Image (cartoon, rainbow, N blue to C red):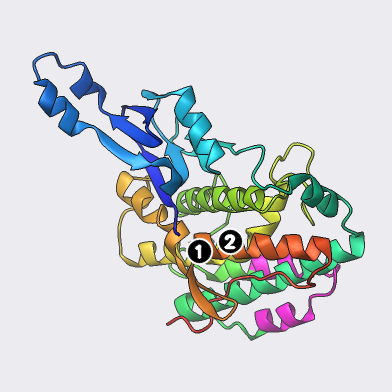
Amino acid sequence: MIKKTLYFGNPAYLSLRNKQLVIQLPEVVKNETLPESFKADAVKTIPVEDIGVVILDNKQLTITHGLMEALLENNCALITCNSSRMPVGLMLPLEGNTTQTERFRDQIDASVPLKKQLWQQTVQAKIQNQAYVLENKSKAVVKNMLVWANNVKSGDPDNYEARAAVYYWNNIFPDIPGFVRGREGEPPNNLLNYGYAILRAVVARALVASGLLPTLGIHHRNKYNAYCLADDIMEPYRPFVDKLVFEIMESGVDVSELSQELKAQLLTTPLLDVIINGQRSPLMVAVGQTTASLYKCFSGEIRKIKYPSFRELN
């Protein structure tokens, strides 16, 4: 089942009733001139079990502790946004799998050679997906990227990931001369940042559901980063966000500001079509397959992570 991604950008009261998320509007609740029947009809409810991600993007939102508890118990990711209306915080459940202790141990005990092999697979999948986006959107030459992907060794000691990234970002937006990818860079960096934040939450949520620690990466290591593994595993998925952003740019809309309409399009990230294990799947479902396969790699059941591809997509 595909979980819903909910975005709240206006003042609202969010609470829990009968395992349902209850949405009430302050202007309706506080208006004493409105009949109670109208107020009751204005209340919206959504089953908590149907929700995968909640984004809180307004300082006048009120959310009850009971609702937060229910969302986390159902393995929902809660994202909070700052004054610039960009994601700034992520809340995840502490327990997401019944055999969590055993899974933590397998993850922690993973050997360095295994982690290097997993990173090799990750970089190869990322470069291949980047090459697809370049070839099909910006019409750039990608033979070099495919060669780099094929030449990636265990642990990527030759740093083909960085080499491919430089070429990729220099060519992905041909109509923006001198485009530089960076969190504080010029548009469409704002769209990329937002899309990646949604993707990161989806991946972190799936890791917890698979009984893994999002903190312990296979490559990324940063004592200030609580989501190193999420940052590792999301790499091959980033080009799907890039493709979405490119298509938004193609439509000719103004991207200088991250409007509600642009956010609505980026919030479709969990629903994007991908090919994984030879079958078409929504991105959120595919991420679950990726993290489940990652655990099997840690436990010694398999040697290869299941990553997404654009192949077979038109």
- Amino acid beneath label 2: Val
The residue drawn where x is 59% and y is 71% is 308
The answer to the question of whether label 2 and label 1 lie on touching residues, with beta carbons closer than 8 A, is yes
Query: Image quarter for residue 143?
Result: bottom right
Answer few, some or many: residues within 10 Å of disc 2's Cα (few below 14, many 20 plus, some between 14 and 19). Answer: many
- Looking at the rendered structure, the secondary structure element under dot 2 is helix
Q: Quadrant of residue 30?
A: top left
Span shown in magenta: 144-166
Magenta stretch: dominant SS?
A: helix
Q: Could you say which is closer to the camera, residue 247 or residue 185?
A: 247
Q: Residue 171 lies in magenta, yes or no? A: no
Residue 143 vs 281, above or below: the answer is below
Q: Quadrant of the N terminus?
A: bottom left
Query: From this viewpoint, is residue 81 visible?
Result: no
Q: Which labelled disc corresponds to residue 287?
A: 2
- Figure quadrant of residue 128: bottom right
Instruction: Please identify the quadrant where the C terminus is shown.
Output: bottom left
Residue at point 30% right, 38% down? 45
Where does the image place residue 203, in percent across and percent down from the top left? 60, 53
Residue receiving disc 1: 283
